[in-house]
Image: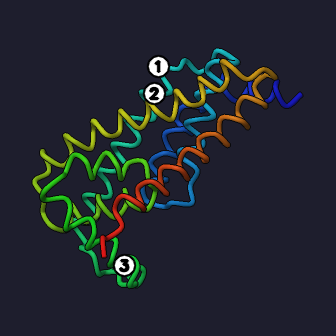
Amino acid sequence: MIDDALADLAAAPWALPFLFALVVGDAFLVVVPGEAAVTAFGALAVTVGSPPLTAVVAVAAGAAFVGDAGCYLLGRTVGLHRWRWMRARRTQRAFGWARDRMDRRLATVLFTARFIPFARLAVNLTAGATRMPAPRHLGIAALAAIAWALYQSLVGAAVARFVPGGPLVAVAVSVVVAIGLGIVLDLVLARVTRPRP
């Protein structure tokens, strides 16, 4: 019964617009489950056949780019101190981290931040606030969005291909795998970027 409901969801005409909205929302609010949605739709593409995996990747990449561009524009418009949450010590540290690294390694920072929810918000806001040239920033952000969409979708598709049990199991396992990979990536990046004594 749940598998049938997931199949109906995947085939619904609003499925891809819903995915688009979740991914764009995830760019601004880290509590929106954009990554999990892309992974789940990647799993449904394999188990149900709908929506097509290429459409999932294209919609996710487009939405990720729109969200990142929106954050860039927001940073350019309001800066990094307008709202109280922006002035918090931890948030200001994140903005400082992004500012220090973007001049030297923009592509590395943008690609890395695309996979870490709060980091991508901090990086895109900082890029806008520091008046980084839009073509340079947005060109690399587009490539990072495509890489992220491919990764998230293919995690779901790979899990669905190799884990038996239908759409519900594929979606559940692929989301857990994606979250686990995200945690591992966070730990590795925290260790790599930790200041040396």
> Residue at 27% of width from left, 53% of height from top?
109
Label located before the other in sequence (3 or 2):
2
Identify the amino acid type marked 1: Thr
Q: Give the CA distance from mark 1 to mark 2.
A: 5 Å
Residue 103's image quarter? bottom left
Name the mark on residue 54.
1
Classify residue 84 by image quadrant.
bottom left
State whether residue 160 appears in this view.
Answer: yes
User: Marks 3 and 1, Cα distance to the nearest angstrom?
Assistant: 37 Å
Q: Position of residue 70 (x, y in %)?
A: 32, 54
- Seen from the viewer's position, the closer of residues 64 and 115 is 115
Say which quadrant the C terminus sits in: bottom left
- What residue does disc 3 label? 86
Question: Which residue matches tag 2?
Answer: 57
Residue 12 at least partly seen: no
**Numbered circles on residues, count:** 3
Determine which of the numbered discs, if any, sits on residue 195 in the image.
none
SS at badge 1: helix
Specify which label sits upstream in the sequence, 3 or 1: 1
Crowd around label 1: few <14 · some 14–19 · many ≥20 (10 Å):
few
Q: Position of residue 30 (x, y in %)?
A: 51, 60
Hey, what amino acid is under mark 2? Answer: Val
